[in-house]
């Protein structure tokens, strides 16, 4: 990766799936990266960096602690707020912590960015759209969310976080941006986090039925993590405030990746249909015109190729 303009970067939640990839990409580009993470869902193994990342520092700290971010020495050029439980399993297990990450965690990260005069990027999500009535979902869509349902902790924490970021910019002039991330997948996902792709891969490798929710007709637009990271950094390096959607350009039914994963693994697993979770979106596809036109970003990895890379990593990891 070529040199980027940031000398010191703060990545909250840098032990998580996307945060750890961002952290590595920034360190490869020569930035000093500080990663506070409470490890409520992240992995300590994901912060064991090789020696080439000399500028990397991990701090066991929770972004919702008011003192955690202010205590970090030095000045940051960029603050990426990615600290929040994100998988369905984690959000159901930690609903209060999820809401705190969107509220107190976002506020604390914003205050650190404001104090340092840093660029700030919030990791938001397609889940702010709920079960959308608009298709594809553009950034102007306000969403159709059940505020008290079982999925509400994650949905509403991110909706509140977006409102907080927008207010902070209006009141204090903080240099902020919001990225809405859609259906990211890739190597090093956790198999038990409840997301479709790692669940399907683990089931196929174990030779057990792949559990597809509903009748398999729900749709998603899968985006490889490398493309997601490129989109986040493109937004960070721009003057855009967002929200800006970052997601795959190909809409597929959930049944299609399930069948492709069976094929890629050579598994004898069958498909088994199970009950669809409450408030699970029926269709999900991002409108990405803003990212294409204003950031020069587009996904480079097709969903099938992305799955091939993901399955390859899981297969090698299982064999070790």
Image (cartoon, rainbow, N blue to C red):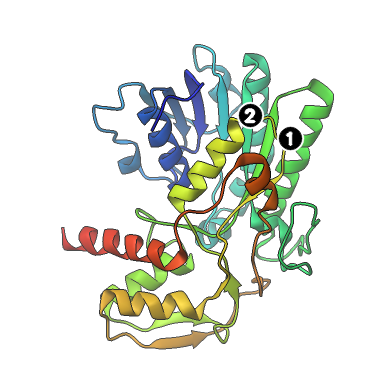
Of helix, strand and loop, which one carries label 2? Answer: strand
* Residue appearing at x 59%, y 57% in the figure: 182
Please identify the residue farthest to the left as the structure is shown. Answer: 320
- Whether residue 134 sits left or right of residue 259 in the image: it is right
Q: Quadrant of the N terminus?
A: top left
* Residue appearing at x 48%, y 30% in the figure: 61
Q: Which residue is mark 1?
A: 165
Residue 34 badge: none
Q: Position of residue 176 (x, y in %)?
A: 69, 30
Whether 163 is drawn above or below 264: the answer is above
Figure quadrant of residue 278: bottom right
Q: Position of residue 207 (x, y in %)?
A: 27, 81
Q: Quadrant of the C terminus?
A: bottom left
Q: Position of residue 34 (x, y in %)?
A: 44, 25
Q: Position of residue 307 (x, y in %)?
A: 39, 65
- Whether residue 177 sits left or right of residue 35 in the image: it is right
In this orientation, which residue lies closer to the viewer: 233 or 43? 233
* Residue appearing at x 26%, y 27% in the figure: 52
In this orientation, which residue lies closer to the viewer: 205 or 65? 205
Q: CA distance from mark 2 to mark 1?
A: 9 Å
- Residue 305 visible in the displayed image: yes
- Residue 41 visible in the displayed image: no
* Residue appearing at x 42%, y 22% in the figure: 31
Q: Which residue is mark 2?
A: 120
Q: CB under 8 Å between callouts 2 and 1? A: yes
- Whether residue 190 sits left or right of residue 104 in the image: it is left
The crowding category of the residue bearing disc 2, from other C-alpha atoms within 10 Å (few below 14, some 14 to 19, many at least 20), is many
* Mark with earlier residue (2, 1): 2
């Amino acid at each position: 990766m070529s040199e980027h303009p940031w000398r010191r970067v703060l990545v909250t939640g840098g032990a998580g799936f996307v945060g750890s990839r961002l952290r590595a990409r920034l360190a490869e580009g020569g930035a000093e990266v500080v990663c506070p993470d409470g490890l409520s869902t992240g992995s300590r193994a994901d912060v064991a960096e090789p020696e080439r990342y000399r500028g990397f520092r991990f701090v066991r700290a929770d972004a919702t602690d008011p003192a955690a971010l202010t205590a970090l020495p030095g000045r940051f050029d960029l603050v990426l707020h990615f600290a929040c439980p994100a998988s369905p399993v984690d959000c159901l297990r930690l609903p209060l912590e999820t809401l705190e990450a969107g509220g107190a965690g976002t506020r604390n990260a914003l205050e650190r960015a404001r104090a340092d005069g840093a660029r700030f990027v919030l990791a938001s999500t397609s889940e702010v759209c709920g079960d959308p009535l608009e298709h594809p979902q553009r950034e102007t869509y306000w969403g159709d969310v059940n505020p008290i349902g079982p999925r509400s902790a994650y949905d509403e924490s991110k909706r509140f976080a977006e409102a907080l970021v927008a207010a902070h910019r209006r009141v204090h002039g903080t240099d902020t941006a919001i990225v809405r991330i859609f259906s990211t997948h890739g190597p090093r996902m956790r198999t038990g986090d409840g997301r479709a792709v790692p669940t399907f891969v683990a089931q196929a490798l174990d030779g057990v039925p792949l559990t597809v929710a509903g009748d398999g007709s729900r749709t998603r637009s899968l985006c490889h993590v490398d493309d997601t990271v490129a989109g986040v950094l493109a937004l960070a390096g721009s003057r855009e405030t967002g929200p800006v959607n970052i997601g795959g350009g190909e809409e597929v039914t959930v049944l299609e990746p399930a069948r492709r994963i069976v094929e890629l693994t050579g598994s004898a697993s069958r498909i088994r249909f199970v009950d669809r979770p409450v408030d699970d979106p029926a269709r999900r596809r991002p409108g990405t015109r803003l990212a294409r036109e204003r950031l020069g970003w587009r996904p480079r990895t097709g969903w099938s190729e992305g799955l091939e890379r993901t399955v390859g990593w899981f297969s090698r990891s299982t064999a070790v």
